[in-house]
Amino acid sequence: MTLNIYDMISIQQLTFHYKKQQALFSDLSFQQENGSITGLLGKNGAGKSTLLKLMAGLLKPQTGQLAINGFSPFDRLPDFLSDVFMVPEEFSIPPVSIDCYIKATAPLYPNFGHGKMDQILKEFELDRKKNINRLSHGQRKKFLIAFALATNCRLLILDEPTNGLDIPSKSLFRKVLVSSVSEDQLVLISTHQVKDIDTIIDKIVMLDEGAIVFNKEVVNISQKWQFKTVVSLSGMEKPVYHEKCPGGYRIIQPATDEDESDIDIELLFNAIVNKANLN
């Protein structure tokens, strides 16, 4: 199979394993165009962070083909590095002021928006003069997210971006993210905190046992499936998936034209993990 140069992310028959371990990915294939905020979901150990690191050029696959914006990530060419930004779950930042970090690092990104940076810092209530390492973990995370958005990179990779954020900051993160990205960008978010992103993602991709087992647009999911809570399962057509909850059952059933519902991503995730037929 050949890579599709029109896809921002193009992966074909990729294999990867850490030393002395079984293959985490074997014959993995995945394509994604720009213009969406995509949620990457999966159980612990499914390989989400590893896949993101492969896309960012931090790891090299053993076999297969991987291209981001037409570049092989592990070659780490300047034109690739200047158009991809990753916010990792764990990170380290030099002990300098926010202003110093921006002045030193922003020139690496030709499309960096200083006005956008100022606006997001204001919304996050971050002072340019503050030393980054004297900020709380949540404030440092907000700074790194602000910088990522200001780079205007075509691919933004966010690994557990809401970890360490309090409830008001999570709400602000969603607002800032949606207002800051353009249609020619792709934002790929990996998270266990599915409720933190359920209102902002356009697409859901799920990784399980080294393969992409679910890959659908949110609008298509809501048109095909209905998510609701019922008191009892008796007297109704058997849902494709259900689980007990306080006051009754959370269910997934075929949608009708008259009655669409919001997607319950947590319930959808559980259904996929439990092999419910959602094709």
Image (cartoon, helix red, strand yellow):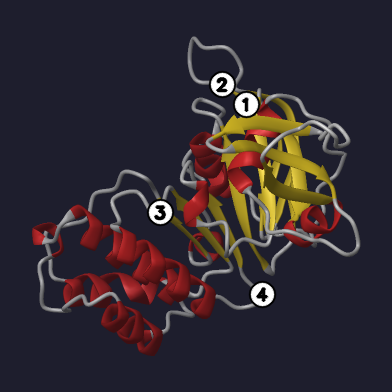
Residue 88 or residue 171, whichever sits in front: 171
Residue plotted at (60% across, 51% down): 39
Q: Nearer the viewer, mark 4 or mark 1?
A: 4
Residue 14 visible from this viewpoint: no
Checking the image for residue 62, the label placed there is: 1
SS state under label 2: loop
**First reached walking from the N terminus: tag 2 or tag 3:** 2
Q: Nearer the viewer, mark 2 or mark 4?
A: 4
Mark 2: amino acid: His
Residue plotted at (72% across, 48% down): 227
Location of residue 101 (image quadrant): bottom left
Residue plotted at (29% across, 48% down): 91
Checking the image for residue 277, the label placed there is: none
**First reached walking from the N terminus: tag 2 or tag 4:** 2
Question: Tag 4: Cα neighbours inside 10 Å, few (<14), some, or many (≥20)?
Answer: some
- In the displayed structure, would residue 100 be above or below residue 141? below
Q: Nearer the viewer, mark 4 or mark 3?
A: 3
Q: Which residue is mark 2?
A: 17
- In the displayed structure, would residue 127 be above or below residue 196? below
Mark 1: amino acid: Gln
Q: Which residue is mark 4?
A: 184
Residue 127 or residue 53, whichever sits in front: 127
